[in-house]
Image: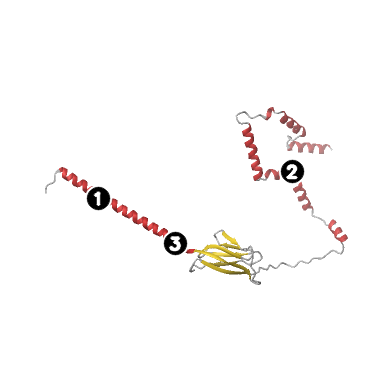
């Protein structure tokens, strides 16, 4: 069988088309298979998550009197969510199998339970009893004064150490308050008011040159008053003048 050049070219062309077609079909089948397996695994994970969801409900009661505890905390450990019991101590919350649930209330010891992993069904009920948490304090003896007059006398004559008086004077001094005021950061209200004032001033002088305080007569009057009061004197000058006055005396 003899092939001409044209026949050979057509045969090679058809062979290359069949090769690319086979590759395309193989890649398509592989992609479809991977997509089906991914959907199947996702469906299985979703089904597993749905099967692990449990509706936990019950009542929290005192161990001694079997009375419902209102406003008791029912918290899922390491999940950051929980609920509170109602007036009768009844609660209901959605949890997962294997979760640890903490029951707590003021004046009672905490109690932690675990949801079984092999639980059949999606509901789990519990009646949780909490034991009183008793704290023993050291004894304190109270002795009354013989008379109100003796109490007043002792109260007035009580000596307070000088260091405490000095600390009180330093805390109430005006200079100390100014230092604390300058060092304390502004709260949210002060920060918002400052921002509003700055925005108002910017919008007020928008499109024009803002005024300069060097030409403001009121600013000059305040400067002259402060200069006469000696607000701009350095501490060294003040200390030297005071030392010279004391030496003269």
Residue lying farthest top? Answer: 215
Q: Identify the disc placed on residue 19.
A: 1
Residue 183 placement: quadrant: top right
Say which of 157 and 102 sits in front: 102
- Give the residue at x 63% y 37%: 198
Residue 89: image x %, image y %?
62, 66
Q: Marks 1 and 3, how far apart in space?
A: 42 Å
* Relative to 102, residue 182 above or below: above
Residue occupying the point 59% across, 69% down? 128
Judge the density around disc 2: few (<14), some (14-19), many (≥20) Cα neighbours within 10 Å.
Answer: few
Q: Which residue is mark 2?
A: 175
Q: Which quadrant is home to the C terminus?
A: top right
SS type, badge 3: helix
User: In the rendered structure, which disc, 2 or 1, sits on the residue that comes first in sequence?
Assistant: 1
Alpha carbon separation for disc pair 2 and 1: 93 Å
Q: Position of residue 39 (x, y in %)?
A: 39, 57
What residue is disc 3 on? 47
67 relative to 195, above or below = below
Depth check: give the residue in front, 112 or 35: 35
Q: Are marks 1 and 3 in contact (CB under 8 Å)?
A: no
Badge 3 local density, few (<14 within 10 Å), some, or many (20+)?
few
């Amino acid at each position: 069988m003899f092939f001409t050049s044209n026949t050979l070219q057509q045969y090679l062309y058809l062979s290359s088309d069949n090769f690319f077609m086979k590759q395309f079909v193989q890649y398509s089948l592989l992609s479809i298979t991977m997509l089906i397996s991914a959907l199947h695994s996702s469906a299985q994970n979703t089904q597993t998550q749905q099967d692990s969801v449990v509706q936990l409900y019950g009542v929290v009661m005192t161990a001694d009197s079997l009375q419902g505890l209102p406003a008791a905390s029912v918290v899922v450990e390491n999940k950051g969510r929980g609920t509170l019991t109602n007036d009768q101590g009844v609660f209901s919350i959605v949890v997962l199998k294997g979760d640890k649930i903490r029951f707590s209330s003021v004046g009672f010891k905490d109690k932690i339970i675990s949801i079984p992993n092999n639980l059949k069904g999606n509901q789990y009920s519990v009646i949780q009893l909490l034991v009183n948490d008793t704290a023993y304090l050291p004894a304190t003896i109270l002795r009354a004064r013989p008379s109100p007059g003796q109490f007043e006398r002792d109260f007035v004559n009580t000596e307070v150490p000088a260091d405490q008086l000095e600390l009180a004077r330093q805390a109430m001094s005006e200079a100390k308050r100014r230092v604390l005021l300058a060092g304390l950061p502004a709260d949210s209200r002060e920060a918002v008011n400052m921002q509003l004032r700055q925005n108002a001033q910017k919008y007020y002088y928008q499109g024009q040159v803002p005024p300069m305080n060097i030409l403001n007569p009121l600013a000059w009057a305040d400067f002259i008053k402060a200069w006469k009061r000696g607000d701009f004197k350095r501490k060294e000058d003040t200390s030297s003048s005071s030392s010279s006055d004391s030496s003269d005396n």
